[in-house]
Every structure is written in C-alpha cells, then in structure tokens.
Amino acid sequence: MKLHELHDNEGANRKKKRIGRGPGSGKGKTGGRGIKGQKSRSGVAINGYEGGQMPLYQRLPKRGFNKPNRKSYAVVNLGLIEKFIAAKKLDAKAEINEDTLVASGLVRRKLDGVRILAKGELKSKVNLAVTGASKAAVEAVTKAGGTLTTAASSE
C-alpha cells in the first residue's frame, strides 16, 4: 500500500450541508427554518418558554435547602498520602499538616480546611494534623502506628 492509495471507508465522510445557498442545494431560500415567525429569525433563545403557559421548572415544587455558609473541605485519601510518601514528596518523619500537603501538591488549596478519608492503605507511620478526619481514617493511622490530630479534637 502506498500513501496515495489511502482513503476513508465508503460512507465515512459526508459533505457538509450548505444552508441558504440557492434552490439547487435543497436548503435554499428559508434555509430549513420555515416561513416567518420568531424561530425563523436569528438571535432567538427560547429555552424553557412554553408560550405564556407557566413553564415546567416553575410548576414543579421546590425542595430542600442550600446552606449559604456551609463549609467546603479539601478531601485527601490515605492511599494518596502513602503514594506521596513513597514518591518522596512528603516526609513521613516530620509532622504533615495542611501547609505541607499544599506545598507537596497533594492539595491544590485548603478551602475551609483539609479532611482525611480512609480510602487506600497507609503503611507508613505518620503524624498528621488537619481540620477533620473520618473515624475509619483515624483508626487506620493509629493502626499504622501514627497519630492524627484534628482541629475539633485539639480545641
């Protein structure tokens, strides 16, 4: 096979339909938009509009409550901490706090604090100081021989 013999499979490539390019094109004059009216004109966005009837999104009951001042935590799994220790990006001997996690690149930004979750396996003995942690994460760290202090437990 030579370069000039290469081609697409039959039917794999279709020519683009050129709209509004004369009667011979099959989509001339009105360009498939019908005659007159709002939808035939340009610059029209009528999403969710139901012709004066109350729109569906307004007819449905509203439920729930979004807390305006809720806290948002940066989440870190134990498996990732272990991976960063193995890659020498974190020092297991020194205390690992939120600032060291950000400096290592494990957490992009602290938000309202860092929360440790128990996904993954922790083999290293680490000393963690963070805002929060799940019970399973605290157990996993103590089982590995380390300590995990949270902001709630230190107050």
Image (cartoon, rainbow, N blue to C red):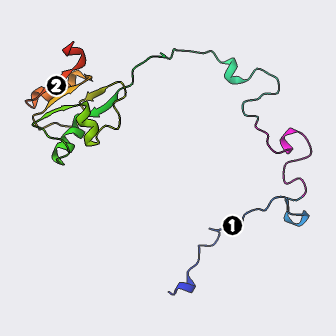
At x 21%, y 38%, the residue is 81
- The amino acid marked with disc number 1 is Arg
Specify the label residue 14 is tagged with: 1
Residue 101: x and y in percent read: 25, 36
Residue 55: x and y in percent read: 73, 23
At x 91%, y 63%, the residue is 23
Is residue 37 covered in magenta? yes
Read off the residue under disc 2. Answer: 148
Quarter holding the C terminus is top left
Residue furthest toward the top? 155
Who comes first in sequence, dot 1 or dot 2? 1
Residue 49: x and y in percent read: 76, 29
Bounds of the magenta span? Answer: 29-45
Vertical position of residue 21 compared to residue 10: above or below: above
In which quarter of the view is residue 63 placed? top right
Residue 88: x and y in percent read: 16, 47
